[in-house]
Amino acid sequence: MEFKEIAAGCYYFNSAVNIGYIVNEDESKGMLIDAGLESSAAKKAVQHLVKKNLPITHLFITHAHADHFGGAQYIQRNFNVHTIAPSLEEAIMRNSILEPIYLFNGNSPLSEMRNKFLEAPSIRVDEICTEGIWDKTFPLEFLALPGHSHNQFGVSYKGILYAADAFLGSDVLEKHKIPFIVNATENQETLLKLKNMNIEGMVPGHGKFTKKYHEVIQENIDVHEKIATQVHSIIAESGDSGISLENLIAKIITQYNIQPANIGMYTLFRTAVSAYFIQLIEEGKAMYKIWGGKPIIFLGQ
Ligand SMILES: [Zn+2]
């Protein structure tokens, strides 16, 4: 885990899941941006900040995925931090079993799904953020970046945007194959919003800080457009007989040569692929019928 300075007052710990850190002018307030997968990651980060005499007064969690707030309970137990999170996401952070519950279509999750990748320790949230400038003495700006998660937020400070999982770094985009999203339309809109920004650079949740964010975001847009086209083609090829949602998901997963190791991993891909078919239905380009006890998808008229 490497501690990197990006700009005056802007840092991040580069790891499998990045942890951001910003400090105000007089170094009286310091905010952690996300907390890593587990307490050991959070511990390493805060120990480093303590050693450097940097303040730890605030904790902002961008979205309620376990790999981003798994270390947050450790931070709250050991530091007096004011914790900020977006609405809806904060409800999941306070009741973290909701993540495996929604991934498992609302059922009580199988006990094997209650692991650190899908269910972080629950935390307290002190403040719900809204878009715009947050505090005059610590003039950072919160931005809504939905799509990867229902109400994900990023934070911008001194020309640097901590973009959470709104996009993946070039170095990890290929590895993910099908990036996780819950809403394809919002995801596209968020990517375009970021691409049109004019700032110094961006830190993704996974991958390296980049000044060439216009290029990296275009690579992300291309990946999503390719998957959307494939989903559309598979439905088109199914013709009048249509295709079940389960078979559509299976075709995409096998086309990408993905072998989910367990049901938890499968539910992540199922959710991501479903986002594209939901977009087609919402746009009137596809429709479904319940046939033989299951939803069958067809191209729209
Ligand atoms: Zn995420």
Image (spheres, rainbow, N blue to C red):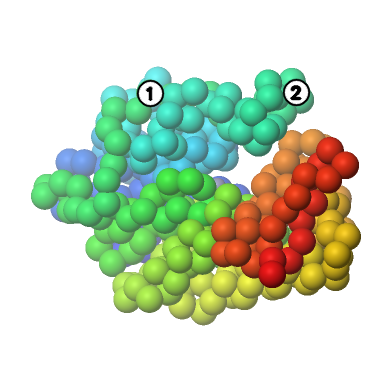
Q: Which residue is mark 2?
A: 110
Q: Quadrant location of the C terminus?
A: bottom right
Mark 2 lies on a secondary structure that is: loop
**Amino acid under label 2?**
Leu
Task: State the image coordinates of residue 113 (x, y, percent, origin top left).
Answer: 72, 28
- Would you say residue 227 is visible in this rendering? no
Q: Is residue 43 left or right of residue 244?
A: left
Q: Is residue 99 left or right of residue 235?
A: left
**Amino acid under label 1?**
Arg
Task: State the image coordinates of residue 256 (x, y, percent, origin top left).
Answer: 82, 63
- Hey, which quadrant is residue 219 in on the image? bottom right
Question: Which mark, by number, is residue 289?
Answer: none
The residue drawn where x is 20% and y is 48% is: 134
Pick whichever, 198 or 42, lies toward us.
198
> On screen, 142 above or below 31?
below
The residue drawn where x is 77% and y is 61% is: 298
Pick whichever, 65 or 40, lies toward us.
65
- Would you say residue 197 is visible in this rendering? yes
Q: Which residue is mark 1?
A: 124
